[in-house]
Image (spheres, rainbow, N blue to C red):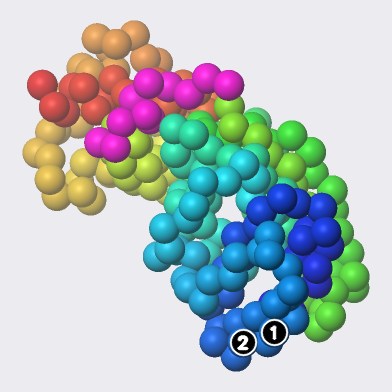
Amino acid sequence: GLGALTEDLVKKSNQIHAYEIDSALFAYLSKKFSKFENLKLYNEDILKAKIPSHDIIISNIPYSITGPIFEKVFYNPQSPRGALIIENSIAERLFNRKSYKSFSRITVTFNAFMKPVKKFKISRFDFFPTPKIDLSLVIVEPRKEIDQTLLSDDGRTFFLKFVAGIMPYKNKNMANAINFFIKNDKNYTYSKQHIEDFLHENQIRNYKLAHFSVDEIVELSRKFFTFLNN
């Protein structure tokens, strides 16, 4: 954008890495902040950039790329803290982990890696031009303990694919949800009976997916990943 937030941050931070994909805005910002040696500007797509080491992410995240940015920045073994302005409906999904309505793919994936700490609703009329959606400022930090499977590239990749595959069926029991994931993936040929046997052998109750906690889904993903690779 026009650097309103960056203008305050450069006065309070030792080092800032800021990304602007628009070339015209990048030229404007380069001139505006030319005197600040603690600011490094990049004319890059954040989703394709190799981000330098950092402690905290501060951003007004566009709705259309919230998921991909979360995955790139936070779904890692050493995630930074975050102060983010996001659409209020997404903020609700991060915080309301026990609400059927809010429980979604992003609820599970985000809370597997991060801990939502605080949420402040912001009036859309505090912005110009005025957005058409309600916004929230959320403060997040890395979880102190992350499941070991999520620390490996293969385990993390499978977990994200598994959650994406089962969450559209949160009103189904777990065996049915996993069965749909298997059918849609095309890489596996397991039957529903195989899935039911897997759940029984691992003492996992076959109730509706929406009744599982985030940690239970993480554990299930780890066990199912092992099952598929044996």
Q: Which residue is at a point 31% across and 31% down the rendered structure image?
A: 152
Residue toward you, 76 or 187: 76
Give the alpha-carbon distance from disc 1 to disc 2, as whole Å.
Answer: 6 Å
Q: Name which residue lies at 46% across and 41% down.
A: 75
Query: Which quarter of the rendered picture does the C terminus lie within?
Result: top left
Location of residue 111 in the rendering, given as x and y in whole percent from the top left corner: 56, 34
Q: Is residue 106 visible?
A: no
Disc 2 designates what residue?
Answer: 27
Q: Does 159 sit left or right of 110 as displayed? A: left
Which amino acid lies under the numbered mark 2 shown in the image of this protein? Ala
Q: Please, what secondary structure does the residue beneath circle 1 have?
A: helix
Q: Which range is magenta? A: 144-154
Closer to the camera in the image, 139 or 53: 53
Can I make out residue 37 in this image? yes
| Residue for point 58% across, 74% down | 20
State yes or no: residue 63 in magenta.
Answer: no
